[in-house]
Image: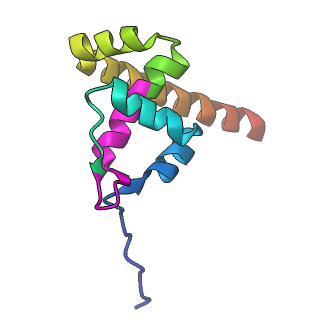
Amino acid sequence: MPYKKPKIEKIFYTIGEVAEMFQVNTSLIRFWEKEFDILKPHKNNKGNRLFTKEDIENLKIIYHLVKEKGMTLKGAQKKLKENKEETLHNIEIINRLKDIREMLLEIRDEI
């Protein structure tokens, strides 16, 4: 039986890795950390920020509201305080629709 390499999932991500995921500067991530209460990365002894999967999910929400929908920081903060669950649901629907669109475009290209 062939050896299967175990899938290793990271517990923490550095600020550089997170910035790369979102294709933004690390300074923007630090700025959002100050502005949004839901971002609470751990810090090691050196003071380096270590982001969990939950932090990354919260950053996805912030990114969607600020960068994709064009909301102001105050507007995004208000939206998160008033109705975070609805925002999560909307993001999920948008992602599903993007996946379906991509799949349909692939089918079209194959025809």
Work out whether residue 58 can be spotted: yes
Q: How far from the left and from the top, in percent, is residue 24? A: 58, 37
Q: Quadrant of residue 48?
A: bottom left
Check the image and name the residue furthest to the bottom. Answer: 1
- Residue at 33% across / 33% down in the picture? 58
Left or right: residue 76 compared with residue 107: left
Is 82 contained in the magenta span?
no
Decide: is 97 above or below 40.
above
Q: Quadrant of residue 1?
A: bottom left
Quadrant of the image containing the C terminus: top right
Who is closer to the viewer here, 13 or 2? 13
Q: How far from the left and from the top, in percent, is residue 62? A: 41, 25
Left or right: residue 73 compared with residue 42: right
- Residue at 35% across / 29% down in the picture? 34
Q: How is the image coloured?
A: rainbow
Task: State the extent of the magenta-drawn residues as a range.
Answer: 43-62
Q: Quadrant of residue 5?
A: bottom left
Work out whether residue 60 can be spotted: no
Who is closer to the viewer here, 61 or 96? 61
Check the image and name the residue furthest to the front. Answer: 46
Q: How far from the left and from the top, in percent, is residue 70? A: 53, 12
- Residue at 38% across / 70% down in the picture? 7
Decide: is 41 above or below 7.
above
Please tell me how many numbered marks the rendered image carries: 0
Is 52 contained in the magenta span?
yes
Decide: is 59 above or below 75.
below
- Residue at 26% across / 19% down in the picture? 84
